[in-house]
Image (tube, rainbow, N blue to C red):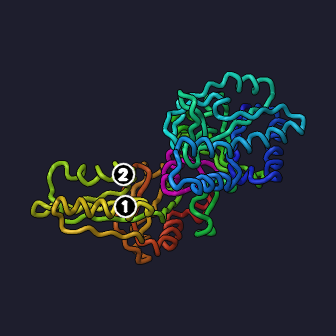
Amino acid sequence: MRIVQKFGGTSVGSLERIRATADLVEAELARGNQIAVVVSAMSGETNRLIGMATEMDATPCEREIDALVATGEQVSAALLAIELQHRGIRAYSYNGAQAGVTTSGDYKRARIKSISCAHLQNHLQAGEVPVVTGFQGVDEQGNITTLGRGGSDTSAVALAVAVEADVCDIYTDVDGIYTTDPRIVSKARKMEQISYEEMLEMASLGAKVLQTRSVEMAMRYNMPIHLRSSFENITGTMVVKEDDTMERAAISGVAYNRDEAKITILGIPDHPGIAANVFGPVAEAGINVDVIVQNVSAQGFTDITFTVPRSDYQATMKLMRDLCTSLHGRDVQGDDGVAKVSVIGVGMRSHAGVAKTMFDALAAEGVNIQMITTSEIKITVVIEEKYVELAVRSLHTAFALDATPDER
């Protein structure tokens, strides 16, 4: 079996943790598997490096920032290779360029274009272990580029695809994916498997266990991901293609995101192109818009309400006030005390009544719904942030997620 193992910052956060990581690599080799490894920087190292840069210049050049932070992964890769070599394992560290990772030239947010990995394949076939830096590559001009926060997950999946691995094991400080946040619901259960689509929805709603781009890539190339703990030798959660032969529960999990703000622009002229007028400046500012509701036109005027990340609230409010003035609108209102709560499940496609169950459960707890949006496998509501935990607990119970699969 050919496996790509990815280890996050906490898994390589100290020499002790690097030795424990080497134990996991060695154990897979002992089972007769071919192993390639992708590593993140030691936990906190990227922030430390950026902190030094901003002490030199409050707005440092993005090219130099990428060159600087890429060194964090190189330290992890070299130290792990040294530890493996100390154990008699033939291991070799590679940075992004040496591994053949070619990216777009977008500093701090590059995308992988290709991986030329014949030399890595040779290592695997010889029973050797290439240890590759995650999060980075080089563009066609040879400049070091990074993939953005969480990019090592994407590096690992891309490498798994390139070397034709059977699975990509992503080791982290959690032992799998749960039906909801165990810190809120003590009865939350670890799932044995979850579909790519469900995982994408959970990741987009703030579940930090996997980076969204890595799941998108895994789904595109049908690369199974095994999310598991580097601290416990137990099976985690498989992220895989949906199994059409399996009878699925309507809802697999409940997710939430507190990082939300709601903005409403009131009394703007209702004519073709008005939505483009509203969201054009927001897009140009690089701000992501999520839930959107436009009211029915009344006497030629309409209201548009939408959500943005809370960190972009003030900037978006300024854009909307300027726009409201130019359009002779009535007012702009905002609220940065909202959150999103969602129920997610591919079984929703074949089960009726999911929305009713969700809305009934929230109503029974006195939780008012401010906005609603849906996809084929998700229903999301915007509510006051103070009700998040109450909403998550009530929905987890309403959809029988407290029970074991045999009890449902």
**For the residue labelled by badge 2, is the local secondary structure a helix, a strand or a loop?**
loop
In the rendered image, residue 8, in percent from the top left (x then y), is placed at 68, 49
Q: Residue at x 44, y 76 (%)?
A: 365
Task: Identify the mark nearer the N-term, 2 or 1.
Answer: 2
Disc 1, SS:
helix
Tag 2 residue:
285
Residue 118 in magenta stretch: no
The answer to the question of whether label 2 and label 1 lie on touching residues, with beta carbons closer than 8 A, is: yes
- Residue 70 versus residue 125 in the image, above or below: below
Residue denoted by label 1: 315
Label 1 crowd (10 A; few <14 / some 14-19 / many >=20): few
Q: Residue furthest front?
A: 56
Point out the stretch of residues depicted in magenta: 191-212
Q: Is residue 300 visible?
A: yes
**x 36%, y 57%: residue:** 291
Report which quarter residue 147 is drawn in. top right
- The residue type indicated by label 1 comes to Ala
